[in-house]
Image (spheres, grey):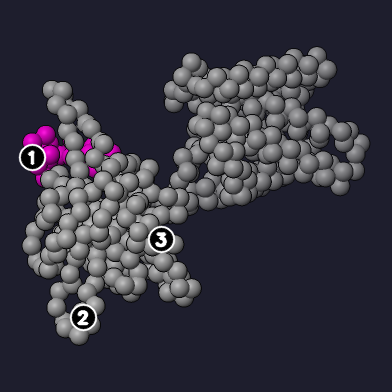
Amino acid sequence: MADLPRPTRIYIVVVLVVAAAAVVVTLILAPPRVDRAPLALLLLACATIAQQFKVKSPKHQSYYTTTIFFFAAALVLRPAYVMAIVIAAHAAELLRFRYRWYIAAFNVANFLICSITAGAIFGLAGSGAAPWSRMALAILAGVVFIALNHLLTAFVIMWARGVALSKAGTLDLENLGTDVALMSIGALGALLLLSNPWLVPLTLGPLFLIYRSLLVPTLKEEARTDPKTELANMKHWSAVGGDEIDRARRFGRPLSVAIADLDLLRDINNRYGHLVGDQMIVRVAQAIRSAVRDYDLPARFGGDEFAILMPETTLPEALIVAERIRQGVQAIELRVSDGTRVMVSASIGVAAFPRAGGNASELLAAADRAVYQAKAQGRNQVCAFAEPADQLRWPRPAVVTTLPVVGATSSDASLVGGPHGRA
């Protein structure tokens, strides 16, 4: 735990202490009932199995259907059984996936606090409560369970990663909605256990559908993501680009497109092997992701080319972003097995809507011609596409000019676009 920031370590310890204290108090006030042991074993088995079927979301969060059984156990069992179910499920997962001990301990403590609190709320109904009262308290218990679980997780992410609470991801509507569906099934199963246990298997169908639905966002993300760089692929980029260009045309807003082409990546592949070249491409993608803004869309355009869509961005603003990308790529350094340092640079072309083109294809072609200019002028610089005023009168190739950019070589030379190679 020494690798975590100090506030995070303190927070985790506090959560562990609170969970331990809650368990001790509830064990004294509500000792386990032997007659509930068979039901506890059944829920333990279900939770342990469900914990093995983890679904990773596109935002690198994990979903489990296990919370259904944790919540159901919280409503119908004493805390001692709940503690055994939560610990057993996470212990079984640790046998397959080796997490840091404090991550597993925090998750167990988190679910224990949520389960004990939810069980205490539902316990207010008493044994002779009316059905509507039990239903109302089950809903309240579910809301509290979800709120506590997500808040406890959001705070640890906030302090561990240094992000705002709203950026932690656990408070997103999509994330909350998923757990609401899971809690609903858990509450339904618990109420059926108390009234007619033979109807409980009917909840397995919705549970299967929920698990399958959790896979949909991941499949969608995979369909629009380049697997090597985890940037958007060009199919997704083109679709978003078309929509953004239509919006820019409709409301008269600025928009720019950039293409970044790695310089002499072929030489790196030939000298150090394609594995090093692939590592370089991944590092370049990370540098681009760090340099762009939240509303920009970077994508892998080809083998060693990247396209960046920049809505609400004028040409001077786009040049600033492109220069930031160039500097980020230039700072990349890989070390191969013999200790040799491998570095790379990028030539970047920028084109602005509507002057350089009225659709995504035209903007990409204009930015691509600007890349040729950057290559011709010595590589590792940023160039902007400029359409000559008389181009509409003569069907000749467009002219590319270099605009002054901080940190990039500026030149008054121009190059007529044409079919010549680049590296």
Q: Which residues are magenta?
A: 266-284
Element type where label 2 sits in the image: loop
Q: Position of residue 14 (x, y in %)?
A: 66, 19
Q: Position of residue 208 (x, y in %)?
A: 56, 47
Q: Position of residue 17 (x, y in %)?
A: 67, 16
**Residue wearing tag 3:** 313
Q: Position of residue 74 (x, y in %)?
A: 73, 31
The image quarter containing residue 279 is top left
Instruction: State the residue at coordinates (14%, 64%).
Output: 414
The reply to whether the magenta stretch includes residue 275 is yes
The amino acid pointed to by label 2 is Asp
**Residue wearing tag 2:** 390
The image quarter containing residue 168 is top right
Q: Nearer the viewer, mark 1 or mark 3?
A: 3
The reply to whether the magenta stretch includes residue 31 is no
The amino acid pointed to by label 1 is Asn
Element type where label 3 sits in the image: loop
Residue 31 visible? The answer is no
Toward the front, the furthest residue is 412
Separation of disc 1 and disc 3 at Cα? 38 Å
State if disc 3 and disc 1 touch (CB < 8 Å).
no
**Residue wearing tag 1:** 270
N-terminal of the pair, mark 1 or mark 2, is: 1
Instruction: State the residue at coordinates (26%, 46%).
Output: 407
Separation of disc 2 and disc 3 at Cα? 26 Å
